[in-house]
Image (cartoon, grey):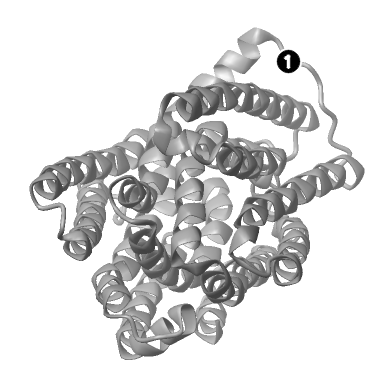
Amino acid sequence: MNCLIRMLQKLKAIANTEDKKRLLSNFFSLSVLQIFTYVLPLLTLPYLVRVLGAEKFGLVMFAQAFIIFFNILVDYGFNLSATREVSVNRDNKEKLTEIFSSVMSIKFMLIGISFTILSIVIFSFEKFSNNIELYYLTFLWVIGQALFPVWYFQGLEKMKYITIVNVTSKLIFTIAIFVFIQDESDYILVPILNGLGFITGGILSLWIVYKDFKQEFKIQSVKILILYFKDSSQFFLSRLSSVGYSNINTFLAGILLSPVFVTYYYLADKAVSVILSLFSPIVQTIYPYLAKKYNYIFLVKLLSILIFASLLVVSLGYLFSDLISIILLDEINKIFINLFHVILPIIPISTLYVMLGAPLLLARGFKKEFNLSIIYGFVIHLLLLSLLYYYYSLNPNLQSDILILFAISLVFSKFVVLMIRIYYVFINKLFKKSF
């Protein structure tokens, strides 16, 4: 965290005073949010693994990996498209009402579609019908996420509201875990508490939107809804591809392997995500700023600092991997450590391709290139997983080996995304243009 604070301090002289104050305020708000989002699980995950056991914990994480796909559908890329629209039209109250009302309406329609698909899958496959209540209760997460208009606050660059709401709900959820989950049979309480936390946060955020921002909701015409739906559709596939990378690995591991191995993979991926989350506030802060006003020097300097910081963090990750294993699994687990080592390079790779994405390609209007880079990488990832699935069908006893190969495919496909974005940046001479 101190490293990220120094980054912002080094960049203070680049923006004007008003921009600087807003960027720093948003950065610190999002940094606090990231701490609670990723550090609190470091308290709860080891506890849940110990209380529920690796088997039940893996089952719960598999349910989450499955439900995340519905969360992506309901989000439908609005966290990118709507953020941009709100940022550009923040001074037009009538337009903001149109954006807010349209996006929320579409999201509720998509919730209905998602619930229908979920029910069909649950009652069609024995893998899911054995734990019907687990998947339905985990779906509460999707409803809570839909209620929370993160894109609205981010577009207005009012990140403190995101922080207040999320921190409140996450604290309640974290405390409830230690109070109510006491043995293996309480595994079903995990999605209940998680879902109620998200729904509470969503309702609170809508109250803030109405009370503090005087934002109204008005029924929009079908024509307007179709317009916003089409506009965000170009981001849906890239969003599906982006979130689907790690998630599909966890999901596939749950389909093919024992829940114990799902636990190992999920924790290794989660540990890397926690480290990577340290850089997320930077990107979330500067995206709406650069979407409204491009600053080439600001972006280049920030990119250089992030490259150095991400490499430093990776080195520390390798150095303290045994300690991380003890914290999460209460032992030095070689399967977990090997997975963690393989996934660690994702940190500098993801940091770079994310910085070249929304803050550069998307902010400068290269939406097609932004989306295609992720889609191409995800297609390659799916092809690799298809080959691994065939390999596993021939060697079903190599469960730990297949996990390592899953991790390698993840790193390679994200590296492909980085290379494609570098290609787009240089072919369009974005680092030579002055806007």
Q: Is residue 10 left or right of residue 332?
A: right
Q: Observer-nearest residue: 60 or 413?
A: 60
Q: Observer-nearest residue: 243 or 31?
A: 243
Q: Residue at x 87, y 44 (%)?
A: 207
Residue with the mark numbered 1? 220
Q: Observer-nearest residue: 187 or 118?
A: 187
Name the image quarter holding residue 346.
Answer: bottom left
Q: Is residue 18 left or right of residue 48?
A: right
Circle 1 packing at 10 Å, graded few (<14), some (14-19), many (20+), is some
Q: Amino acid at mark 1?
A: Gln
Q: Is residue 435 visible?
A: no
Up-down relation of residue 337 to residue 394 (above or below): below
Name the image quarter holding residue 37.
Answer: bottom right
Q: Residue at x 53, y 84 (%)?
A: 6
Query: Which element is circle 1 on?
Result: loop
Report how many numbered discs are placed on residues in the image: 1
Name the image quarter holding residue 302.
Answer: bottom left
- Quarter of the image that includes the N terminus: bottom right
Q: Position of residue 420 (x, y in %)?
A: 21, 48
Q: Observer-nearest residue: 227 or 249?
A: 249
Q: Residue furthest right?
A: 211
Up-down relation of residue 424 to residue 16 (above or below): above
Q: Is residue 183 visible?
A: yes
Q: Position of residue 25 (x, y in %)?
A: 70, 68
Q: Position of residue 49 (x, y in %)?
A: 51, 71
Q: Position of residue 55 (x, y in %)?
A: 44, 61
Up-down relation of residue 78 to residue 21 (above or below): above
